Image (cartoon, helix red, strand yellow):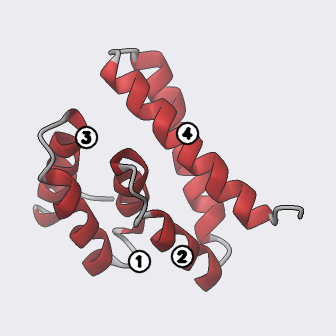
């Protein structure tokens, strides 16, 4: 069965979230910045699909992979902050770099520093 355009975007988003996390873990700043830019474009394309895109990103935020769930939640903050913060709080409890980054995202959101 052929994947829809939205499914391809969601798949690419998940792969890019993993790549971004790996770049952050290995301190590869160029790759991390490149992946962050890709993630921003993918998220914009996903959310441009309207309610279906938002629901797809919400589903991705429930991934068992914290790096994927957390990144999806970050891009849901503007349109569904209650759900996004719930996911980020769960991820922030992890004693890992992704947990720390989720905590930073929550802090920035609560201080009004987010976009």
Q: Secondary structure at mark 2?
A: helix
Q: Which mark is residue 16?
A: 4
Eyeballing the image, is 76 above or below 92? below
The front one of 22 and 40 is 22
- For residue 72, side relative to residue 57 (left or right): left
Measured from the top left, where is residue 108 in percent x and y? 17, 55
Badge 1 or badge 3: first in the primary sequence:
1
> Which residue is rendered at x = 35% and y = 58% of the image?
74
Residue at 82% over, 62% down: 3
Is the residue marked by circle 2 packed among few (<14), some (14-19), or many (20+) residues within 10 Å? many
User: In the rendered structure, are the residues bearing label 2 and label 1 in contact, judged by CB atoms less than 8 Å apart?
Assistant: yes
Distance CA(mark 1)–CA(mark 3): 22 Å
Name above or below for residue 7 compared with residue 71: below
Residue 54 circle label: 2
Crowd around label 1: few <14 · some 14–19 · many ≥20 (10 Å): few
Report the Cα–Cα distance between label 2 and label 4.
18 Å
Above/below status of 25 relative to 35: above
Q: Residue at x 15, y 47 (%)?
A: 94
Between the residue at mark 2 and the residue at mark 1, the CA separation in whole angstroms equals 8 Å
Disc 1: which residue: 79
Query: Which residue is label 3 attached to?
Result: 98
């Amino acid at each position: 069965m052929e994947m829809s355009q939205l499914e391809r975007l969601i798949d690419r988003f998940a792969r890019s979230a993993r790549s971004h996390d790996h770049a952050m873990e290995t301190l590869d700043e160029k790759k991390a910045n490149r992946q962050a830019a890709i993630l921003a474009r993918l998220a914009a394309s996903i959310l441009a699909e309207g309610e279906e895109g938002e629901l797809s990103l919400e589903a991705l935020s429930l991934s068992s992979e914290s790096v994927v769930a957390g990144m999806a939640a970050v891009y849901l903050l503007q349109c569904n902050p209650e759900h996004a913060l719930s996911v980020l709080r769960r991820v922030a409890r992890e004693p890992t770099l992704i947990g720390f980054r989720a905590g930073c995202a929550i802090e920035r959101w609560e201080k009004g520093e987010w976009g």
